[in-house]
Image (cartoon, rainbow, N blue to C red):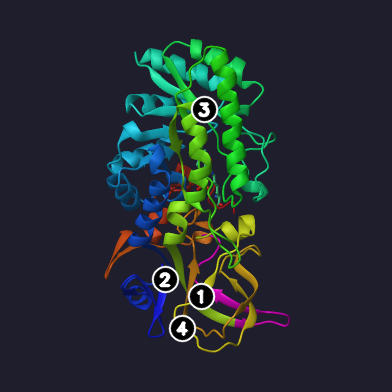
Amino acid sequence: MLKYKDGELFCEGVALRDIASEAGTPFYLYSLARLLENFHRIRKAFSKANPLIAYSVKANSNLSILRLLAREGSGFDIVSAGELRRVLAAGGDPQKVIFAGVGKTAEELRLAIQQKILMVNLESEPEAQLLSEIARGQKAVMRASLRINPDVEAHTHEYITTGKKENKFGVSYKSAPALIARIARLPNIEFVGLHVHVGSQILDLTAHINGVKRLVSLIGVLRSEGIEIRTLNIGGGYGIAYGEREKTMNVERAAEKIIPFVRKMGCRLIMEPGRYIVASAGALVTRITYIKVGDLKQFAIVDSGMNHLIRPALYKAYHRIIPVRETRTRKRIEMDVVGPICESADFFAKDRPMPPLTQGELLAILDTGAYGYVMSSNYNTQPRPPEILVNGTAFHIINKRETYDNLLKGEQFPPYLQHGEKGIKGRI
Ligand code: LLP
């Protein structure tokens, strides 16, 4: 999504330096063209199966991005009432919304039923009972599918595996048939299908295929017991190339392998990609506040940190970092690129060979369109950065930089700490 032109880094037709001088730093940047390219690529790859592509809102829930995808006909995979409200605010079609998550509350299920979403992905028996009760109370019938924990090895970071036995997600393959028979008998629930999600950032196609195979054999068992299965939801998880030596999931090959299974089962295919669509369409642009030369290491201290992008701190995730001003020298210096937050985990890169860098220059942290802004925080009372969307030669702020007023807005003093109150005054 980024290219050097005349020694300057551009996103589509806009120089990053121009955005920085107008919007300040740090900022999240998204390329509209790249985002659509990713969406169209996965849609085209699977077009023979005519799937419902339910973009996974958790990856990036900015309203403009949701609206853009809604206009392309995308559906949405949500995990909370908050995400449902975002989809609705963006103009998304509730008839294409699927609700997943292990801990949906009664209030959230009620909203989902009221809004007539497409279906709920159940993850446990008590949840099925609650959904049935609420739907009955509303004189409605809700479509539901069941998430199966496939117990397959996915070769990704342990914090983002979801399809292993020890994970909290879904129900075991073994317990599924009996459980589904009970769910199918619950009033006000129309049981329609199965759901699986093997994990996130999975570059190994075999893991995905194994997940699908688990569902296929389960459908066989269920059909032999007279339970009809109409939808097969294969989740998300397609990995992208963060490192120079990694390869983004080849979705054409994935489709080639997966579609025959779906065809054989005669099911409607549903998929929930998140990262694949948005990760490579985003960058976090930050300015170097200081270069610090320590006894053992050199540090580039930048004006963004783990408060804005927590993936390196949380998963030791690797993100490429490139200077906005092109460097022609081949010289590389090993550096840590770190933020201003008071935590040793506050880094974007460790011992990374970087070209010579100077105070005040801009760096772009790549592939940060997914699980970037959405996982940001206000730790150290630092405002969140703005989100900016580039479209050709134009750029627009699609989410303003937080102000300090925003940060203090919800807080209030108890009576004994308000101005003029005596209370515990004098005791400290
Ligand atoms: N469907 C379900 C049921 C999921 O749990 C997830 C992600 C997705 C779809 C979308 O997966 P994707 O296509 O984006 O891999 N914060 C972590 C990733 C957590 C993913 C959680 N579930 C990260 O920064 O890598």
Inspect the image, locate mark 1, and give the three-letter code of the amino acid beneath it.
Answer: Ile
The tag on residue 194 is 3
Q: Considering only order in the chain, which callout, 3 or 2, is on the residue closer to the N terminus?
A: 2
Report the Cα–Cα distance between label 1 and label 3: 43 Å
Q: Is mark 1 within 8 Å of ligand 1?
A: no
Q: Residues within 10 Å of mark 4 (few under 14, many from 20)?
A: some
Q: Nearer the viewer, mark 1 or mark 2?
A: 2
Inspect the image, locate mark 3, and give the three-letter code of the amino acid beneath it.
Answer: Leu
Q: Residue at x 42, y 71 (%)?
A: 2
Q: Which residue is mark 1?
A: 322
Q: Considering only order in the chain, which callout, 2 or 1, is on the residue closer to the N terminus?
A: 2
Asked whether residue 51 appears in the rendered view, the answer is no
Report the Cα–Cα distance between label 2 and label 3: 39 Å
Report the Cα–Cα distance between label 3 and label 4: 50 Å
Query: Where is the N terminus found, in terms of image quarters?
Result: bottom left
Magenta span of residues: 292-307
Report the Cα–Cα distance between label 1 and label 4: 8 Å
Taking the image as shown, residue 300 lies to the left or right of residue 3, namely: right
Query: Disc 2, disc 3: CB below 8 Å?
Result: no
The tag on residue 189 is none
Q: Residues within 10 Å of mark 3 (few under 14, many from 20)?
A: many
Dot 4: element: loop
